[in-house]
Amino acid sequence: MIRYLRHSDIDFDAYRRSLNSSDNYRIYAEPWYLDAVTGGCWDCLADEGYSRIMPLPYARKLGVKIIVQPLFCQQLGVFGIGKDSVSVNDFYKKIKHLPLRSYAFNEENMAGNGKFITRKNFVLSLNESYEALRINFNKNRKRDISRIGRLKTQVSTDFVVQDFVNAVQQEYPDLPYYRSPVFIRLLEEIKNRGLYDFRGLISDGKEIASVLFLVSGRRRILLMSIKSTFDAYRGAAAFLISRYIQENAQQDLLLDFEGSMIPGIARFYGSFGASPKNYPVLSRPYLFF
């Protein structure tokens, strides 16, 4: 039997055991991650023994809990062991009558009879050699990577949260969520837990581009990339991604580009040879309160 558990009623030890042993683990469903992006506003569905779990983040509107997908959290859904863990039908029945604005399941979840829409992610398996992976890069990526590689630059792994926040805000001045306490709190949690890989491109002592990856089990998730504003360093972010692929090639890892439905960004991710992966989303944008 699937139960709806309020946050205060969750057995977090059992929840973590279920998540960490699941075949479709995502860092987004970690309690500390959800706390960072929701301020602790999330409940959970769980069956007996927590063999399957489904975190439910929410926002309040007029005192009512409304399920909503948080920022910086691409995929949630049902987590567990075995083929039954990926079926969302019985969990969908539990939430279909609840107030819900948006909710994203994960790629391994199989959409059932609900009114799902499909969103696209891009994923690259790193189990081959870098040379074999690079063959699938398109010619523009290869050209950018070769050009940046000929310049006098260094690659840094020193991740300073406030410096990164400043760079992101400068890159995206019109996006208010990069100025929110949620974004800073999440980066600090990631830094403190050591669950990140950072690469910055340095020229003449200045950082001109950077990429930040989340360490999520065998996945490495591209959380953010900051490109150079200088024409001479156009393609610097692509160079750093390629460098990261080279460093992690021939390992049982997946490079998760975290999107995108925006055609230009999707083409950029696909230019590294990444394959599109669909995941189901419930969306009720016209929910009225």
Image: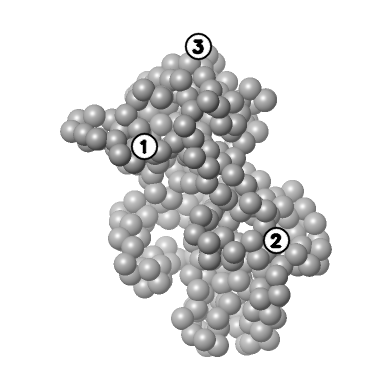
Q: Which residue is mark 2?
A: 273
Amino acid carrying label 1: it is Arg
Q: Is residue 63 left or right of residue 172?
A: left
Q: Residue at x 49, y 35 (%)?
A: 116
Q: Are marks 2 and 3 in contact (CB under 8 Å)?
A: no
SS under mark 1:
loop
Residue at image coords 41%, 31%: 56
Q: Position of residue 72 (x, y in %)?
A: 43, 50
Does residue 278 show up? Answer: yes
Q: Is residue 23 above or below residue 119?
A: above
Residue named by callout 1: 284
| Residue 95, percent from left and from top | 41, 24
**Can residue 158 be seen in this snapshot?**
no
Q: Is residue 130 above or below residue 252?
A: below
Q: Identity of the amino acid at label 3?
A: Met
Q: Is residue 18 left or right of residue 82?
A: left
Q: Residue 76, position in %: x, y?
A: 49, 38
Q: Earlier in the sequence, mark 2 or mark 1?
A: 2
- Residue that label 3 marks: 1
Q: Residue furthest top?
A: 1
* Distance CA(mark 2)–CA(mark 3): 42 Å
Give the foreground label among 2 and 1: 1
Mark positioned earlier in the residue sequence (1 or 3): 3
- Earlier sequence position, callout 2 versus callout 3: 3
Above or below — where is 103 with respect to 205? Answer: above
Residue closer to the observer: 77 or 170: 77
Split into 4 quadrants, where in the image is the C terminus? top left
